[in-house]
Protein backbone atom coordinates (compact mmCIF):
# COMPACT_ATOMS: atom_id res chain seq x y z
CA UNK A 1 0.00 0.00 0.00
CA UNK A 2 1.35 3.35 -0.96
CA UNK A 3 1.11 5.58 2.06
CA UNK A 4 2.77 8.78 1.08
CA UNK A 5 2.70 10.06 -2.45
CA UNK A 6 3.99 13.44 -1.44
CA UNK A 7 7.62 13.77 -2.34
CA UNK A 8 9.40 15.92 0.16
CA UNK A 9 12.28 18.19 -0.59
CA UNK A 10 14.35 15.09 -1.00
CA UNK A 11 12.73 14.67 -4.41
CA UNK A 12 11.56 11.17 -3.60
CA UNK A 13 8.82 9.55 -1.59
CA UNK A 14 9.41 9.93 2.13
CA UNK A 15 9.94 6.83 4.22
CA UNK A 16 7.61 6.10 7.08
CA UNK A 17 8.62 8.13 10.10
CA UNK A 18 10.66 10.75 8.27
CA UNK A 19 8.08 13.47 8.80
CA UNK A 20 7.97 12.74 12.51
CA UNK A 21 11.75 13.01 12.68
CA UNK A 22 11.53 16.31 10.77
CA UNK A 23 9.42 17.66 13.65
CA UNK A 24 12.05 16.71 16.17
CA UNK A 25 14.87 18.12 14.01
CA UNK A 26 13.04 21.42 13.62
CA UNK A 27 12.80 21.79 17.38
CA UNK A 28 16.38 20.69 17.89
CA UNK A 29 17.62 23.41 15.55
CA UNK A 30 15.76 26.22 17.31
CA UNK A 31 17.88 28.30 19.74
CA UNK A 32 16.94 27.79 23.42
CA UNK A 33 15.32 31.20 23.90
CA UNK A 34 13.11 30.93 20.85
CA UNK A 35 10.01 28.94 20.20
CA UNK A 36 8.47 28.61 16.77
CA UNK A 37 4.81 28.06 16.14
CA UNK A 38 3.55 24.54 16.67
CA UNK A 39 3.93 22.86 13.29
CA UNK A 40 0.31 21.78 13.08
CA UNK A 41 0.55 21.04 9.39
CA UNK A 42 3.38 18.53 9.78
CA UNK A 43 1.65 17.02 12.82
CA UNK A 44 -1.50 16.44 10.76
CA UNK A 45 0.59 14.72 8.09
CA UNK A 46 2.13 12.41 10.69
CA UNK A 47 -1.32 11.54 12.07
CA UNK A 48 -2.52 10.82 8.56
CA UNK A 49 0.45 8.54 7.98
CA UNK A 50 -0.28 6.73 11.23
CA UNK A 51 -3.92 6.30 10.25
CA UNK A 52 -2.96 4.82 6.90
CA UNK A 53 -0.38 2.45 8.42
CA UNK A 54 -2.91 1.26 10.96
CA UNK A 55 -5.59 0.67 8.34
CA UNK A 56 -3.12 -1.29 6.20
CA UNK A 57 -2.26 -3.52 9.16
CA UNK A 58 -5.90 -4.00 10.05
CA UNK A 59 -6.78 -5.02 6.51
CA UNK A 60 -3.81 -7.43 6.34
CA UNK A 61 -4.92 -9.13 9.54
CA UNK A 62 -8.55 -9.34 8.45
CA UNK A 63 -7.68 -10.67 5.00
CA UNK A 64 -5.58 -13.54 6.16
CA UNK A 65 -6.46 -16.80 4.51
CA UNK A 66 -6.55 -18.52 7.90
CA UNK A 67 -4.94 -18.41 11.34
CA UNK A 68 -1.72 -19.88 10.01
CA UNK A 69 -1.23 -17.44 7.16
CA UNK A 70 1.97 -15.72 8.23
CA UNK A 71 3.03 -14.11 4.97
CA UNK A 72 2.12 -10.59 6.05
CA UNK A 73 3.74 -10.70 9.47
CA UNK A 74 6.99 -8.93 8.46
CA UNK A 75 4.98 -6.08 6.88
CA UNK A 76 2.73 -5.85 9.90
CA UNK A 77 5.74 -5.70 12.22
CA UNK A 78 7.35 -3.02 10.09
CA UNK A 79 4.25 -0.86 10.05
CA UNK A 80 3.80 -1.32 13.79
CA UNK A 81 7.39 -0.17 14.39
CA UNK A 82 6.76 2.86 12.21
CA UNK A 83 3.60 3.62 14.20
CA UNK A 84 5.46 3.39 17.51
CA UNK A 85 8.29 5.51 16.14
CA UNK A 86 5.87 8.20 14.98
CA UNK A 87 4.11 8.22 18.33
CA UNK A 88 7.40 8.57 20.13
CA UNK A 89 8.66 11.42 17.94
CA UNK A 90 5.41 13.35 18.20
CA UNK A 91 5.30 13.03 21.98
CA UNK A 92 8.97 13.99 22.26
CA UNK A 93 8.34 17.06 20.10
CA UNK A 94 5.39 18.14 22.23
CA UNK A 95 7.10 17.41 25.54
CA UNK A 96 10.21 19.33 24.58
CA UNK A 97 8.05 22.33 23.69
CA UNK A 98 6.43 22.06 27.13
CA UNK A 99 9.89 21.94 28.71
CA UNK A 100 10.79 25.16 26.94
CA UNK A 101 7.54 26.84 27.96
CA UNK A 102 8.21 25.74 31.52
CA UNK A 103 11.62 27.38 31.42
CA UNK A 104 10.11 30.58 30.04
CA UNK A 105 7.96 30.82 33.15
CA UNK A 106 11.08 30.77 35.34
CA UNK A 107 13.02 33.18 33.12
CA UNK A 108 10.34 35.71 32.29
CA UNK A 109 7.77 35.49 35.07
CA UNK A 110 4.06 34.79 35.06
CA UNK A 111 3.38 37.00 32.05
CA UNK A 112 5.31 35.88 28.99
CA UNK A 113 6.73 38.36 26.45
CA UNK A 114 4.40 38.96 23.56
CA UNK A 115 6.55 37.30 20.92
CA UNK A 116 6.54 34.07 22.92
CA UNK A 117 2.81 34.27 23.58
CA UNK A 118 2.20 34.51 19.86
CA UNK A 119 4.11 31.28 19.25
CA UNK A 120 2.04 29.27 21.69
CA UNK A 121 -0.76 27.14 20.35
CA UNK A 122 -4.11 27.22 22.16
CA UNK A 123 -3.58 24.02 24.14
CA UNK A 124 -0.08 25.14 25.11
CA UNK A 125 -1.51 28.39 26.45
CA UNK A 126 -3.93 26.38 28.58
CA UNK A 127 -1.07 24.18 29.81
CA UNK A 128 0.92 27.27 30.72
CA UNK A 129 -1.97 28.78 32.65
CA UNK A 130 -2.47 25.57 34.62
CA UNK A 131 1.26 25.36 35.29
CA UNK A 132 1.28 28.95 36.49
CA UNK A 133 -1.61 28.20 38.82
CA UNK A 134 0.10 25.08 40.21
CA UNK A 135 3.28 27.01 40.86
CA UNK A 136 1.38 29.85 42.53
CA UNK A 137 -0.48 27.38 44.77
CA UNK A 138 2.80 25.79 45.76
CA UNK A 139 4.42 29.15 46.56
CA UNK A 140 1.37 30.02 48.66
CA UNK A 141 2.01 26.91 50.75
CA UNK A 142 5.40 28.40 51.62
CA UNK A 143 3.82 31.59 52.86
CA UNK A 144 4.08 33.34 49.52
CA UNK A 145 7.83 32.86 49.05
CA UNK A 146 8.59 33.66 45.41
CA UNK A 147 10.90 30.83 44.44
CA UNK A 148 11.52 32.19 40.97
CA UNK A 149 13.53 34.99 42.57
CA UNK A 150 16.76 34.65 44.51
CA UNK A 151 18.53 32.69 41.83
CA UNK A 152 22.03 33.71 42.91
CA UNK A 153 23.51 33.68 46.42
CA UNK A 154 23.33 37.22 47.80
CA UNK A 155 26.77 38.73 48.34
CA UNK A 156 25.63 42.07 49.66
CA UNK A 157 22.42 43.87 50.41
CA UNK A 158 22.77 46.55 47.77
CA UNK A 159 24.35 46.41 44.35
CA UNK A 160 25.57 48.90 41.79
CA UNK A 161 23.50 48.76 38.63
CA UNK A 162 23.40 50.59 35.33
CA UNK A 163 20.17 51.18 33.51
CA UNK A 164 20.14 49.83 29.96
CA UNK A 165 16.74 51.12 28.88
CA UNK A 166 14.48 54.08 29.43
CA UNK A 167 12.38 52.47 32.14
CA UNK A 168 10.92 55.41 34.00
CA UNK A 169 10.04 55.54 37.68
CA UNK A 170 10.65 52.69 40.05
CA UNK A 171 9.09 52.78 43.48
CA UNK A 172 11.11 50.90 46.07
CA UNK A 173 9.69 49.05 49.07
CA UNK A 174 10.70 51.91 51.34
CA UNK A 175 8.65 54.33 49.26
CA UNK A 176 11.49 56.13 47.47
CA UNK A 177 11.11 56.87 43.78
CA UNK A 178 14.09 56.16 41.54
CA UNK A 179 14.23 57.47 37.98
CA UNK A 180 15.66 54.80 35.69
CA UNK A 181 16.90 56.62 32.62
CA UNK A 182 19.27 55.30 29.99
CA UNK A 183 22.80 54.83 31.36
CA UNK A 184 21.94 56.13 34.83
CA UNK A 185 23.68 54.33 37.66
CA UNK A 186 22.11 53.44 40.97
CA UNK A 187 22.95 51.73 44.22
CA UNK A 188 19.87 49.69 44.99
CA UNK A 189 18.84 46.78 47.21
CA UNK A 190 19.26 43.43 45.53
CA UNK A 191 15.64 42.42 46.10
CA UNK A 192 14.37 45.42 44.12
CA UNK A 193 16.66 44.87 41.15
CA UNK A 194 16.68 41.17 40.59
CA UNK A 195 13.68 40.91 38.32
CA UNK A 196 14.76 43.99 36.36
CA UNK A 197 18.21 42.49 35.80
CA UNK A 198 16.56 39.32 34.50
CA UNK A 199 14.43 41.34 32.11
CA UNK A 200 17.50 43.13 30.83
CA UNK A 201 16.46 46.58 32.09
CA UNK A 202 19.33 46.86 34.56
CA UNK A 203 22.88 45.56 34.43
CA UNK A 204 24.85 44.53 37.51
CA UNK A 205 28.18 46.37 37.53
CA UNK A 206 31.24 44.50 38.79
CA UNK A 207 31.29 42.62 42.09
CA UNK B 1 20.52 36.68 66.54
CA UNK B 2 20.01 33.02 66.14
CA UNK B 3 22.56 31.99 68.71
CA UNK B 4 20.38 33.32 71.46
CA UNK B 5 17.13 31.83 70.30
CA UNK B 6 15.71 28.46 71.08
CA UNK B 7 13.13 27.27 68.66
CA UNK B 8 10.92 24.40 69.53
CA UNK B 9 11.17 22.31 66.42
CA UNK B 10 9.61 19.01 67.27
CA UNK B 11 11.91 16.35 65.88
CA UNK B 12 10.85 12.77 65.97
CA UNK B 13 13.67 10.25 65.92
CA UNK B 14 13.38 6.49 65.80
CA UNK B 15 12.64 6.11 69.46
CA UNK B 16 9.65 8.42 69.33
CA UNK B 17 11.36 11.02 71.49
CA UNK B 18 10.96 14.70 70.85
CA UNK B 19 14.09 16.80 70.52
CA UNK B 20 14.34 20.50 70.85
CA UNK B 21 16.77 22.05 68.42
CA UNK B 22 18.34 25.47 68.61
CA UNK B 23 18.00 27.81 65.70
CA UNK B 24 21.64 27.27 64.82
CA UNK B 25 21.09 23.53 64.57
CA UNK B 26 18.04 24.02 62.39
CA UNK B 27 20.06 26.21 60.08
CA UNK B 28 22.81 23.61 59.91
CA UNK B 29 20.22 20.96 59.11
CA UNK B 30 18.84 23.15 56.32
CA UNK B 31 22.26 23.72 54.78
CA UNK B 32 23.11 20.04 54.88
CA UNK B 33 19.74 19.10 53.41
CA UNK B 34 20.24 21.70 50.70
CA UNK B 35 23.64 20.33 49.67
CA UNK B 36 22.38 16.74 49.81
CA UNK B 37 19.34 17.57 47.74
CA UNK B 38 21.33 19.40 45.05
CA UNK B 39 23.78 16.53 44.70
CA UNK B 40 21.48 13.52 44.84
CA UNK B 41 19.86 12.11 41.68
CA UNK B 42 16.37 12.12 43.13
CA UNK B 43 14.23 13.36 45.98
CA UNK B 44 15.25 12.84 49.57
CA UNK B 45 12.87 12.82 52.53
CA UNK B 46 10.95 16.01 52.87
CA UNK B 47 12.32 18.54 55.33
CA UNK B 48 9.14 20.57 55.27
CA UNK B 49 9.19 21.19 59.03
CA UNK B 50 12.65 22.70 58.84
CA UNK B 51 11.79 25.14 56.10
CA UNK B 52 8.39 26.09 57.53
CA UNK B 53 10.07 26.80 60.84
CA UNK B 54 12.88 28.85 59.32
CA UNK B 55 10.57 30.91 57.14
CA UNK B 56 8.46 31.69 60.18
CA UNK B 57 11.55 32.73 62.11
CA UNK B 58 12.74 34.96 59.27
CA UNK B 59 9.39 36.70 59.29
CA UNK B 60 9.37 37.25 63.04
CA UNK B 61 12.93 38.59 63.02
CA UNK B 62 11.95 41.01 60.28
CA UNK B 63 8.93 42.13 62.27
CA UNK B 64 11.26 42.98 65.15
CA UNK B 65 13.59 45.13 63.10
CA UNK B 66 12.23 48.38 64.47
CA UNK B 67 13.71 47.53 67.86
CA UNK B 68 17.24 47.00 66.57
CA UNK B 69 19.87 49.57 65.62
CA UNK B 70 20.17 50.37 61.88
CA UNK B 71 23.61 48.79 61.73
CA UNK B 72 22.38 45.54 63.20
CA UNK B 73 19.38 45.60 60.86
CA UNK B 74 21.71 45.62 57.84
CA UNK B 75 23.59 42.57 59.06
CA UNK B 76 20.41 40.72 59.98
CA UNK B 77 18.87 41.50 56.61
CA UNK B 78 21.81 40.00 54.75
CA UNK B 79 21.66 36.93 56.95
CA UNK B 80 17.95 36.60 56.29
CA UNK B 81 18.51 36.94 52.56
CA UNK B 82 21.10 34.19 52.69
CA UNK B 83 18.71 31.91 54.57
CA UNK B 84 15.92 32.71 52.14
CA UNK B 85 18.26 31.94 49.25
CA UNK B 86 19.15 28.55 50.73
CA UNK B 87 15.51 27.65 51.33
CA UNK B 88 14.52 28.85 47.86
CA UNK B 89 17.27 26.93 46.12
CA UNK B 90 16.47 23.80 48.13
CA UNK B 91 12.81 24.00 47.15
CA UNK B 92 13.69 24.75 43.51
CA UNK B 93 16.00 21.77 43.31
CA UNK B 94 13.18 19.52 44.51
CA UNK B 95 10.61 20.99 42.14
CA UNK B 96 12.93 20.49 39.19
CA UNK B 97 13.30 16.83 40.09
CA UNK B 98 9.53 16.50 40.41
CA UNK B 99 8.97 18.11 37.03
CA UNK B 100 11.50 15.84 35.38
CA UNK B 101 10.12 12.61 36.80
CA UNK B 102 6.61 13.44 38.06
CA UNK B 103 5.13 10.01 37.51
CA UNK B 104 8.08 8.28 39.16
CA UNK B 105 7.76 10.53 42.22
CA UNK B 106 4.06 9.75 42.54
CA UNK B 107 4.64 6.00 42.13
CA UNK B 108 7.36 6.07 44.78
CA UNK B 109 5.04 7.77 47.24
CA UNK B 110 2.29 5.22 46.60
CA UNK B 111 4.64 2.42 47.63
CA UNK B 112 5.58 4.00 50.94
CA UNK B 113 4.24 2.55 54.15
CA UNK B 114 2.49 4.45 56.93
CA UNK B 115 5.52 4.88 59.17
CA UNK B 116 8.17 5.78 56.63
CA UNK B 117 8.90 9.46 56.08
CA UNK B 118 7.44 10.67 52.78
CA UNK B 119 9.63 12.10 50.08
CA UNK B 120 6.97 14.55 48.99
CA UNK B 121 5.47 17.15 51.27
CA UNK B 122 1.68 17.51 50.91
CA UNK B 123 2.11 20.62 48.74
CA UNK B 124 4.73 18.87 46.60
CA UNK B 125 2.43 15.88 46.16
CA UNK B 126 -0.33 18.14 44.87
CA UNK B 127 2.18 19.88 42.59
CA UNK B 128 3.46 16.58 41.18
CA UNK B 129 -0.03 15.26 40.59
CA UNK B 130 -1.22 18.45 38.90
CA UNK B 131 1.90 18.64 36.75
CA UNK B 132 1.53 15.05 35.64
CA UNK B 133 -2.20 15.38 34.92
CA UNK B 134 -1.71 18.64 33.10
CA UNK B 135 0.98 17.20 30.85
CA UNK B 136 -0.96 14.00 30.14
CA UNK B 137 -4.10 15.96 29.30
CA UNK B 138 -2.10 18.13 26.92
CA UNK B 139 -0.62 15.10 25.16
CA UNK B 140 -4.07 13.58 24.78
CA UNK B 141 -5.64 16.71 23.37
CA UNK B 142 -2.87 17.71 21.01
CA UNK B 143 -1.73 14.35 19.74
CA UNK B 144 -2.98 11.08 21.11
CA UNK B 145 -6.63 11.46 20.29
CA UNK B 146 -5.61 11.95 16.65
CA UNK B 147 -3.76 8.66 16.62
CA UNK B 148 -5.15 5.18 15.84
CA UNK B 149 -6.97 3.53 18.81
CA UNK B 150 -4.11 1.37 20.20
CA UNK B 151 -1.91 4.47 20.38
CA UNK B 152 -4.32 6.69 22.23
CA UNK B 153 -2.94 5.80 25.62
CA UNK B 154 0.46 5.03 27.02
CA UNK B 155 1.47 2.20 29.26
CA UNK B 156 3.31 3.28 32.36
CA UNK B 157 6.49 1.54 31.35
CA UNK B 158 6.59 3.73 28.24
CA UNK B 159 5.52 7.03 29.71
CA UNK B 160 7.36 6.96 33.02
CA UNK B 161 10.88 8.32 33.11
CA UNK B 162 13.36 7.09 35.67
CA UNK B 163 16.03 9.12 37.38
CA UNK B 164 19.39 7.41 37.27
CA UNK B 165 19.82 6.20 40.82
CA UNK B 166 23.13 4.62 39.99
CA UNK B 167 25.08 7.80 39.37
CA UNK B 168 28.21 8.10 41.46
CA UNK B 169 28.34 10.45 44.40
CA UNK B 170 31.03 11.56 46.82
CA UNK B 171 30.15 11.44 50.47
CA UNK B 172 31.60 11.86 53.92
CA UNK B 173 30.79 9.50 56.75
CA UNK B 174 29.29 11.16 59.81
CA UNK B 175 29.11 8.17 62.11
CA UNK B 176 30.55 4.67 62.05
CA UNK B 177 28.47 2.26 60.00
CA UNK B 178 29.02 -1.45 60.03
CA UNK B 179 28.33 -4.07 57.40
CA UNK B 180 27.35 -1.81 54.58
CA UNK B 181 26.77 -3.53 51.25
CA UNK B 182 28.20 -1.12 48.69
CA UNK B 183 28.77 -3.52 45.84
CA UNK B 184 26.81 -6.76 45.63
CA UNK B 185 29.92 -8.51 44.36
CA UNK B 186 32.05 -7.50 47.32
CA UNK B 187 31.56 -8.41 50.99
CA UNK B 188 29.99 -5.75 53.25
CA UNK B 189 32.38 -3.07 54.51
CA UNK B 190 32.66 -0.99 57.65
CA UNK B 191 32.60 2.77 57.24
CA UNK B 192 34.37 4.89 59.83
CA UNK B 193 33.62 8.43 60.82
CA UNK B 194 35.17 11.19 58.67
CA UNK B 195 36.05 8.89 55.79
CA UNK B 196 35.43 10.34 52.34
CA UNK B 197 34.24 7.84 49.77
CA UNK B 198 32.68 7.56 46.35
CA UNK B 199 30.04 5.04 45.35
CA UNK B 200 26.84 4.60 43.41
CA UNK B 201 23.93 6.43 44.94
CA UNK B 202 21.49 3.55 45.42
CA UNK B 203 23.38 1.33 47.90
CA UNK B 204 24.06 4.22 50.26
CA UNK B 205 20.79 6.11 49.87
CA UNK B 206 19.37 4.64 53.07
CA UNK B 207 22.47 5.79 54.98
CA UNK B 208 21.90 9.27 53.62
CA UNK B 209 18.31 9.28 54.81
CA UNK B 210 19.40 8.10 58.25
CA UNK B 211 21.73 11.09 58.36
CA UNK B 212 24.80 8.87 58.73
CA UNK B 213 26.52 10.29 55.67
CA UNK B 214 26.44 13.59 53.85
CA UNK B 215 27.07 14.32 50.19
CA UNK B 216 30.04 16.37 49.04
Image: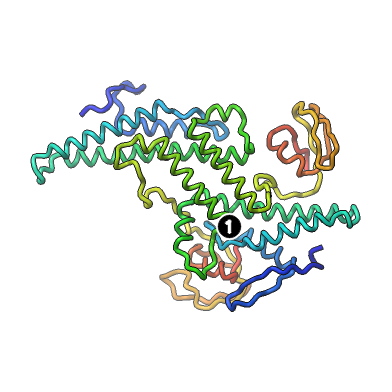
- Pointer 1 chain: B
**Residue A154 x/y as whole percent:** 75, 49
Horizontal side of B142 relative to B100 (left or right) equals left
User: Which quadrant of the rendered structure holds the N terminus of chain A?
Assistant: top left
Tell me which corner region of the image, top left, top right, bottom left or bottom right, holds residue B146.
top left
Q: Is residue B186 visible?
A: yes
Percent position of residue A189, x then y: 80, 43
In this figure, which residue is indicated by the disc labeled 1?
B39
Q: Quadrant of residue A103?
A: top right
Residue most extreme to the right: B69
Residue A17: % across, % down: 33, 34
Q: How many residues crowd mark 1 within 10 Å: few (<14), some (14–19), many (20+)? A: some
Seen at 34% across and 32% down, the residue is: A47
Residue drawn at x 10%, y 45% is: A67
Colour treatment of the image: rainbow
Quadrant where the image shows the C terminus of chain A:
top right
- Element at label 1: helix
Residue A149 in picture, x, y percent from top left: 68, 45
Q: Nearer the viewer, residue A59 or B186?
A: A59
Residue A43 vertical position relative to residue B1 in the rendered view, above or below: above
- In the displayed structure, A107 sits above or below B183; it is above
At a point 48% along the width and 48% down the height, the residue shown is B132
What residue is rendered at 55% in x and 35% in y? A32
Residue B212 location, quadrant:
bottom right
Please tell me how many numbered marks the rendered image carries: 1
The answer to whether residue B31 of the structure is visible from this angle is no
Residue in the foreground of this view, choosing between B19 and B193: B19
Amino acid sequence: AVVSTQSGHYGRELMFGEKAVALVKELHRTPPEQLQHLNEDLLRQVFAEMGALFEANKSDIENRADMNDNKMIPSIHMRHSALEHNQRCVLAYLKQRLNKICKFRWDHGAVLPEEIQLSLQEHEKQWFNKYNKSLATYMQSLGGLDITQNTVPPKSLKIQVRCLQEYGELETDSGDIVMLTLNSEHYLPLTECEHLIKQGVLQHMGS
Amino acid sequence: WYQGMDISLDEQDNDDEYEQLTAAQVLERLEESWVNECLSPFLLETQQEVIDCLLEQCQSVEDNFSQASPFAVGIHQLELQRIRYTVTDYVRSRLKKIEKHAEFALEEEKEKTEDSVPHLSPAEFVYAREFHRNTLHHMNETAMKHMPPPFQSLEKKHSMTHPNLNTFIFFKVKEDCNDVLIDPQDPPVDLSKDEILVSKYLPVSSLLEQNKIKLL
